[in-house]
Image (spheres, helix red, strand yellow):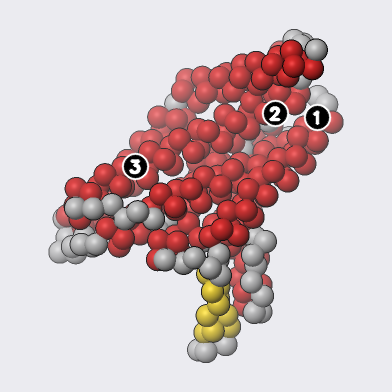
Amino acid sequence: MMLSEFIDDLRQTSVVMNQEFHKYIKGKKLVGFIVLMIAIIAGIYLIFTLSEIKFPSESKDFITLYLRFITILAIVAVTIFSSGLLVSEYEERTGLLLFTRPIKKESIFAGKFLAGFITSTFVIIIYYVIVAIMSYIITGSIYGKIWVSLGLMITYIFGATGIALLFSSYFKKSNTATSVTIIVLLIVGNWISQLFSGNGIEPWFSITYSSGSIITVLNGASAALMYDDAIRSSWYYVADPALSAMVMVTWGVFVSFIASLIYKQRGF
């Protein structure tokens, strides 16, 4: 009995997830974001090829160049594919069509979470693969730690997707959920991290601080480091990659759980 119920829950989750994938494709969100990524990659390439500036000759430096703003790109992806997942059901009243069928809210939430997470991860993986191929063509090699960076990026997307769904489960308008998601992930998170770092406290618990390991791991960072900036009389830290991965996954699990509770209790 329990097994058949579990299988039915998985089936329902799959139905919801596939429905969201169809929406991404039909609504051109997926294609639009991929075009944006290609434009960014091409833009950086043209800046170097049309100017006197030469591309880095080392794969490590080349990859670091292209991944410098990868976290911002990931935030954009999460915002596009996840911030409106739950609120849109209430805003457009499409949730009523689902709830009249025997589909559990837990399955709806799980399906939407997986759709947002998988899609955001998919497009970012495409970016990493393109950068790796370009690195091989231009520098003749691929810096191995790019894949460690990708692994950390996936944990960040997991955590950020949970945060996006938390706001999506609470707010009544998609625009509000989208705006708050961007502000929290891009501005508030950085402000909190800098506040603690500036006072000599490592903000290891911050998902924004932990996301810094996505880039610093390319420079060989394998443990938490602290630097004393004598000029500004302050400290700044480099996150431990292993701890960062655990923190980002924990954020994803915790906020997703809270979001699911809010969503489950929310009525029309």
Q: Position of residue 13 (x, y in %)?
A: 65, 21
| Amino acid type of the residue tagged 1 in the rendering | Lys
Answer with left or right where residue 33 lies relative to residue 192.
Answer: left
For disc 1, the neighbor class at 10 Å (few under 14, some 14 to 19, many from 20) is some
Query: Which of the 4 image quarters holds residue 224?
Result: bottom right
Number of marks: 3
Nearest-to-viewer mark from 3 and 2:
3
Q: CA distance from mark 3 to mark 2?
A: 30 Å
Label placed on residue 109: 2
Q: Quadrant of the C terminus?
A: top right
Q: To which residue does mark 3 refer? A: 129
Outermost residue on the top side: it is 101
Q: CA distance from mark 1 to mark 2?
A: 9 Å
Residues tagged 1 and 2 counted as in contact (Cβ below 8 A):
yes
Answer with left or right where residue 138 lies relative to residue 107.
Answer: left
In this rendered view, identify the residue nearer to me: 185 or 158. 158
For the point 45% across and 35% down, which residue is it?
122
| Amino acid type of the residue tagged 3 in the rendering | Val
For the point 69% across and 43% down, which residue is it?
253
Q: To which residue does mark 1 refer? A: 264
Q: Position of residue 92 (x, y in %)?
A: 67, 22
